[in-house]
Image (cartoon, helix red, strand yellow):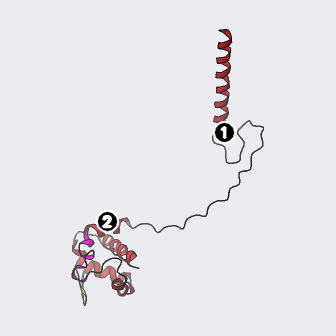
Amino acid sequence: MKTMRLAYKSLALSLSVGALLALSACGKKDGEAPANSTAPAASTTVAAAPAPAPAAPENALGKSVYGKTCALCHGAGVAGAPKPGDKADWGPRIAQGNETLYKHAIEGFTGAKGMMPARGGGSTLKDDEVKAAVDHMVSLSK
């Protein structure tokens, strides 16, 4: 019985020491030996993977405004509205520049291909919201 108790104490002590050694390694830097260790640090040189190309930030506001207001006409091409992604239809419009696109979207426009109501019919939309929606559609159409 005494031998079993001694074996359990020895096992408990071994587990405690192992846990302490594992915890002492927490917070160490790569390749650094744990605190109070006499072992030399192992070389852990690993080639870093190339960083992915930064993605353009998503225009969440423009996407939301488009989905709630603009898609009603632009999604189906109602009244000559250019569908996002139609490069042939958007190309000449994009070539006019963003300021012209913003002006037509905010103030409204009637042209040879159709008409654009002011603020896309969303009279409560702020200028920045309309511009964000235009930017979203343009980004899909380049």
The verdict on residue 41 being magenta is no
- Residue 16: image quadrant is top right
In-front residue for pair 113/120 = 113
- Residue 64: image quadrant is bottom left
Q: Tag 2, which secondary structure?
A: helix
Marker count (numbered): 2
Is 99 situated left or right of 71 in this image? right
Residue at position x 34%, y 67% in the image: 63
In-front residue for pair 127/7 = 7
* Amino acid found under the numbered disc labelled 1: Ala
Above or below residue 82? Residue 55 is: above
Q: Position of residue 117 (x, y in %)?
A: 22, 79
Task: List the residue tagged with mark 2.
Answer: 64
The magenta segment is 69-86
Task: List the residue tagged with mark 1.
Answer: 25
Q: Tag 1, which secondary structure?
A: loop
